[in-house]
Image (cartoon, rainbow, N blue to C red):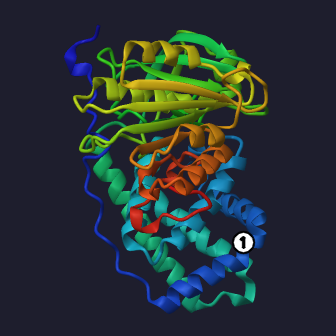
Amino acid sequence: MVPPQFMPDPLYAYEFDEPATPPPLADREVAQLRASLELVKPLASDLTVYFYAILFQRHPEVRQLFPANMDVQRDRLLRGLLRIVDLVDDPDNLVRFCSRLGRDHRKFGALAGHYPAVGDALLDTLARFAGDRWTPQLGDIWARAYGVVAEVMNQAAEDDAALGPAVWEAEIIAHRMRGPGIAEITLLPRAPYPFVAGQFASVETPWQPRMWRHYSLANAPREDGTLTFHVRAVDGGQVSPPLVHHAQPGHVLRLGAAQGEMTLDPGLDRDVLCVAGGTGLAPIKALVEQVAKSEVQRFVDVFIGARTADELYGFDDMLRLAQRNHWLSVRAAVSDEPIAGLNGSLPDVLRQFGPFHRHEVYLAGPTEMVTVAAQSLTRGGVRRERIHHDPFDVSALEAALLPGRIHSGAPA
């Protein structure tokens, strides 16, 4: 057992002030900004290659901030631009998004001096690919928009630096297989790691430096400060296969700050519905642990989905937990294999045991599962604002937005 001072403060992730809301662009300027991005989107692959090429050529010192393989990073650049331009007329959510982005970039070693370099390279890249449609006026609009983004990101990073480190080193103390290609990995951070049940962390391994991947924490905060992750080895992946098949006790990983909004509201006492698919069981397990620790009395229904029985890892553990807690019920749904009592898709099983319109709902798992489950639940009367799930690509580039600007193919 570690000393009490090792216990993380669960409020850390929320105790910050967002920078001031930036002045909005005029409607016609917003329209020009969006039109110019639509113009270059068909050239996105070449655009992102060109951007990083001139950035590294002009400022070779920033190359060390990025992974050797830039494929994922190039895609994130485009998604970041799309999100920022999408929010440019929504100042509150723009500040929220850019603040999270700025805090998250601390783990890369980003400094205030890097922002002008990135801005110059970005504007030169946009000008090149927009061709004769690029004008000095359009350049000024982009420069002002980027200036706001850079200011908010930098201020958020500075404020966050006063609260805690950019990264945490954590040693693997236990590693065991939980199913085909799935490992349960327990870490002991070398400094207190603050988080709330249901959140996720970015993880860097010694085998792929500067290549960060996001994994949900599978536990509520513990007195001994340990953290548990469930990792599935992705075919062709560069981070997850070594974590699953080669990592062992003694190896040291690095963690970025906890993120995510799929957390319990301590002010609510509604019953809870949790739906998990694959390693989406990890944050659901953490939420169930948090309910067990809470003084708020509520019932929790957990549904675990899988295609085959072999993929239904962790089900027995959850059943044993339910046997010890009268407020918890656990059911499984296996879609592609006939198993008596467990056969069926998650939407079918949810309809069978519903309705859940009085519940607070938490969904975690593959994109298709979350989307279909959310649609099924909304058709069953569950209000959208009561359905919680983290973004499908869990990164600061996909950070949750304020309720006024939730929009995508799936309910949020």
Q: What residue did someone put label 1 on?
A: 41
Apparent side of residue 108 relative to residue 160 in the rendered image (left or right): right
* Residue in the image at 44% along x and 18% along y: 322
Residue 400 location, x and y as percent? 46, 54
Picture coordinates of residue 116, whole percent (x, y): 48, 66
Q: Quadrant of residue 19?
A: bottom left
For disc 1, the neighbor class at 10 Å (few under 14, some 14 to 19, many from 20) is some
Residue nearest the viewer, comparing 255 with 9: 9
96 sits left or right of 59 in the view: left
Question: Helix or strand or loop: what does disc 1 sit on?
Answer: helix
Eyeballing the image, is 376 above or below 350?
Answer: below
Visible in this render: residue 407?
A: yes
Image position of 117 with respect to 339: above or below: below
74 to the left or right of 265 = right
Count of numbered circles on the image:
1
**Can see residue 58?**
no
Give the x, y percent position of residue 123.
60, 74
Q: Please tell me in which quadrant of the rendered image residue 31 appears.
A: bottom right
Q: Position of residue 175 (x, y in %)?
A: 57, 11
